[in-house]
Image: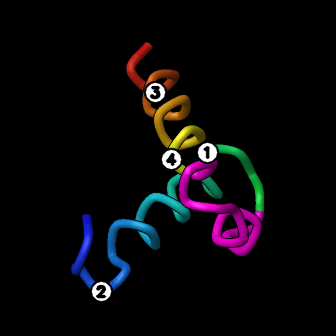
Amino acid sequence: MAGDGGHWIRRNCLILARNNNTPVDFWLSLPLTELRGWIDDNDALMER
């Protein structure tokens, strides 16, 4: 995750935006700790 030039954040923000019909910049504006929680919850829902 760290040192990948921002690939992890961009990829996950794009996934969240697509899955939740929200703008990417909404996800990019969140603090990393909050973003991580949303990513974890989104991943859990996608596993269902």
Residue that mark 4 sits on = 36
Q: Quadrant of the C terminus?
A: top left
Secondary structure state at the residue bearing disc 4:
helix
C-alpha span from label 3 to label 4: 15 Å
Residue at the spot x=69%, y=62% of the render? 30
Point out the stretch of residues depicted in magenta.
23-35
C-alpha span from label 4 to label 2: 17 Å
Residue that mark 2 sits on = 5
Sequence order check, earlier mark of 1 and 2? 2
Residue 32 located within the stretch drawn in magenta:
yes
Give the answer, above or below, for where 23 lies relative to 46.
below
Q: Position of residue 16 (x, y in %)?
A: 58, 51
Q: Position of residue 37 (x, y in %)?
A: 55, 38
Residue that mark 3 sits on = 46
Secondary structure state at the residue bearing disc 2:
loop
**Crowd class of label 1 (few under 14; some 14 to 19; many from 20; radius 10 Å):** few
Sequence order check, earlier mark of 4 and 2? 2
Assess whether mark 3 and mark 1 are in contact (beta carbons under 8 angstroms): yes
Secondary structure state at the residue bearing disc 1:
helix
Residue that mark 1 sits on = 19
